[in-house]
Image: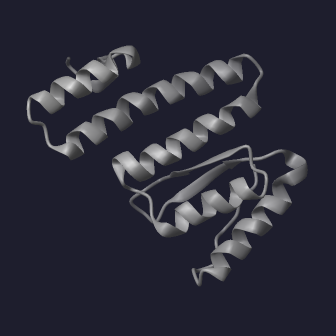
Amino acid sequence: IPTLRDLPYEDLGAALTTLADAGADESVIRYVRHVVGDNRRVEQVIALLDAGDARGAGPVLDEGHRSLRDDLRVSCPELDLAVAAARGAGALGARMTGGGFGGSAVVLAEAAGADAVAEAVTKAIAGAGHAAPGIFTA
């Protein structure tokens, strides 16, 4: 295939098996799984938003964070903690973004619960001895 975006998600399992059978490095397999999966997650979120189901995007954000953490391995303890604290405080979903400059977490929360989520993240980060996060509500 010319690019990973040309690989249909439905063919990902077979592609990963082909890579493994060909002796591809384990990191290549993880990267392919992340890229093809993240392309699918973008499509899922678009469909959810088009259908008026913004809340449904939460689990897709969570899945994306797990992939960034486990497959791409670009997360860090601070971001993992921020995501976990946000979810524990009632956020609908969360994922890191912007790796390479320290990163950020995008958190989807109900407007009524946004302050509680922000407070929980701030407390968790402080409790772990990390620098205070900047929180921007949109």
Q: Quadrant of the N terminus?
A: top left
Question: Is residue 27 or residue 111 the one in the foreground?
Answer: 27
- Percent x, y for residue 69? 43, 52
Name the side, left or right, on which 70 lies relative to 77: left
Kindly identify the residue that appears in the image at 57 percent across and 80 percent down. 130
Type of colouring = one colour
Q: Is residue 83 above or below residue 36?
A: below
Kindly identify the residue that appears in the image at 79 percent across and 68 percent down. 119
Q: Quadrant of residue 30?
A: top left
- Percent x, y for residue 18? 17, 23
Q: Looking at this rendering, what residue extends furthest in the left direction?
A: 22
Q: Is residue 96 above or below residue 129?
A: above
Question: Is residue 58 or residue 4 the one in the foreground?
Answer: 58
Q: Is residue 90 above or below residue 80?
A: above
Kindly identify the residue that appears in the image at 70 percent across and 24 percent down. 49
- Percent x, y for residue 123? 73, 75
Name the side, left or right, on which 130 lies relative to 68: right
Count of picture labels: 0
Q: Looking at this rendering, what residue extends furthest in the right direction?
A: 112
Q: Quadrant of residue 28?
A: top left
Kindly identify the residue that appears in the image at 23 percent across and 46 percent down. 27
Question: Is residue 13 or residue 1 the one in the foreground?
Answer: 13
